[in-house]
Image (cartoon, grey):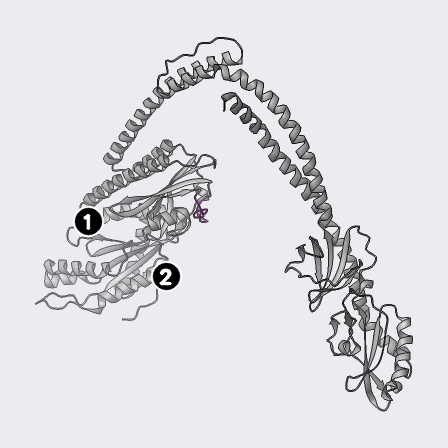
Amino acid sequence: MSLQRRLTIFFILIVVLPLTAAGFVVQRAVVSEVSQRHALTLRPALRASVVRYNDRTRLMNDLVPLVLQKAGSFGLLLSDRRGGKVEQVLGARLEEVEQLDFLIALDKRQRVVGAAAKRGSFAPGFDRPSYEEIAAAPPGPGAGFSRSDLFPVEVAGKGPVGSVVGGFWLDDSLLGGNSEAGVDTFIVVGGRVIASNRALEAPLDVELPDSDRGGLEMGGPGQAEIQRLDGDAAIVAWTSDAPVEAISDQVIESLLGLLALAVIAIAILSHFLARLITRPLEELSEGAIAIAEGRFDHRIQIRSKDEVGRLATVFNEMSDRLSQTVTDLASSRDSLQRAVERVGETLRSTHDMNQILESILNTAADAVQVEAAELWLLTPGRDELYPAITRGSDGDHLAVTPVGEGIVGLVAERGVTVTLPAEGGGPRPSRGERGWPVTTATPIFSSNRIMGVLALHRHDESTAFTRGDVETAVFLAEQGGVAIENVLLHEEARKLSLTDGLTGIWNRRYLQMQFRQVLLTSSRFKRSFCLLMLDLDNFKDVNDKYGHQRGDAVLVEFTRRVSGILREVDTFARYGGEEFVCLLPETNVSGASTTAEKIREVIRAEPFFALGDEPVPMTVSIGIASYPDHGNLYTALIEAADQAMYRAKNDGRDRIRVAGTPGLKVAK
């Protein structure tokens, strides 16, 4: 097949396919609108029949007693079992009441004595139920009827002599008066049509759907609305799909005619257009091959000033721009590589944790070009994440997220990179996160432990992260993990200068540093923390009696016992002499009191001694201060805890006191 023919077919398809799709959409829209309007006629027809049924049901139980009142000596007739007379009376009364179709008299044993009924109009194949069947049925709708309660008939001096039940037929009379054209109404009992407002030639069985609206076969496909009555009876309004299908066929025929005319016109135009394009295509294909091979200096000779000539001009300009773009991309790639290397050097050389975290976040955000980024860190308990640094994202809308919940929680729990959108939808953000259409989150490891999560976001769903973007984010997270590990090693080295030489626990300098960090976290997330000031009672007597070497041994044993009670996130420091401080993050006064009581008990439980030494019983006095109740500065909380500790000593030692609160005596 020649190129000209292929182009002709191609141009035809370009136009015909959208026209076909548009025609299909129009056809569906027209048919849908007609179908909806057709279905709207069902409700008024159904409502008219339901209202008629409800009206007669409401009147039924009121009318039967009134009929009995007008029957006079009906009770005597019933007691004598004069069936003929009973039927005459019932028939006379029934003629007077339009809303009732039958009246049945029963004796004391619920046997039918006499009855009167109007003629019912039912569907073919359905026989009107007998009086015995009606009398044996429960009140309400049944197979072809709806009956009232049993109303007793009494005779003075004899008491009840029987009962009367009345009702109406579930027949065509309930379905009359429908003014909606094209809508048929039916009464269905047990899957069988027993009455219809149209003439049926044969019995009709139907299977009603579970819903009250939808497609239903009624001698043909159609749409129905259903009102279910008590038992298995229902009133159905139905309209056939045939008119809608006829309109659909008409629309399709019209669209096919228009499409045929369009194809003829497009084929003629496409033929001439293909002839105009074919001639210079060879030169253009040679130029494309040259560009594909990287020969951007190739030029196409411009032979005319028409569209083809302008195309050749644009092609030559494109070659120049492609050459410049390739040169710029190579330069940008080299610059990005050098920038990443410089960032890596910065991350490995600095010991400022905040600077490292900001460098990780900013470099990642710039490298993959995102609108927002966050760096989440684990809390000391490693069960929650908090947004340490954000960019392009309002930190006030972010909150602490439990590990295992949301996107960053899942990454922190499983140590895997998550990119959204993903097949199956992927994880949903937690309440502490902000939802973004495009997200990638990767863990940050340090010493084979997850330290945090780097999350990057984009607004536009069409700019999903490429594999290269994700690999860049993972690479920078790995570099950040190395940098964080270096800082932690540096901090470990600094720790040697921040510990007490005798006991090995933290000294006052480290306590002050840690206090600032705990205060910052607690202030940001509105959480409390506590300080415990501990002082060994009568420690001077130990030094005076046993010597300072024995006193040092007591201090070492004291720190060992206390450290065994505290949590990993707590800070235990020697404040000076025999005074010690416990910094308890995320702890209220109640929790601090519990910890203090454990410390007091473990100190007084056993005397202090080493092999060959005389046992020395010791006790401790403890003061408690809480943030923010007793202050929000280091000096204020230390002073509050110290005063509470001295109050414990003044009250008899071996006690616990809370700052600003009268303490209870602690039993010894």
- For the stretch drawn in magenta, what is the main secondary structure? loop
Q: Position of residue 188 (x, y in %)?
A: 72, 64
Q: Amino acid at mark 2?
A: Ser
Q: Tell me where residue 254 sits by quadrant.
A: top right
Stretch in magenta: 422-433
First of labels 1, 2 by sequence position: 1
Q: Amino acid at mark 1?
A: Thr
Q: Can residue 74 be seen here?
A: no
Dot 1: few (<14), some (14–19), or many (≥20) neighbours within 10 Å?
A: some
Q: Tell me where residue 24 sits by quadrant.
A: top right
Residue 510 part of the magenta segment? no
Q: Is residue 346 above or below residue 107?
A: above
Quadrant where the C terminus is found in the figure: bottom left
Please give the label number shown on residue 168. Answer: none
At horizontal 73% and vertical 55% (from top left) the residue drawn is 238
At horizontal 65% and vertical 41% (from top left) the residue drawn is 28
Please give the label number shown on residue 499. Answer: 1
The residue that mark 2 highlights is 590
| 401 vs 313, nearest the viewer | 313
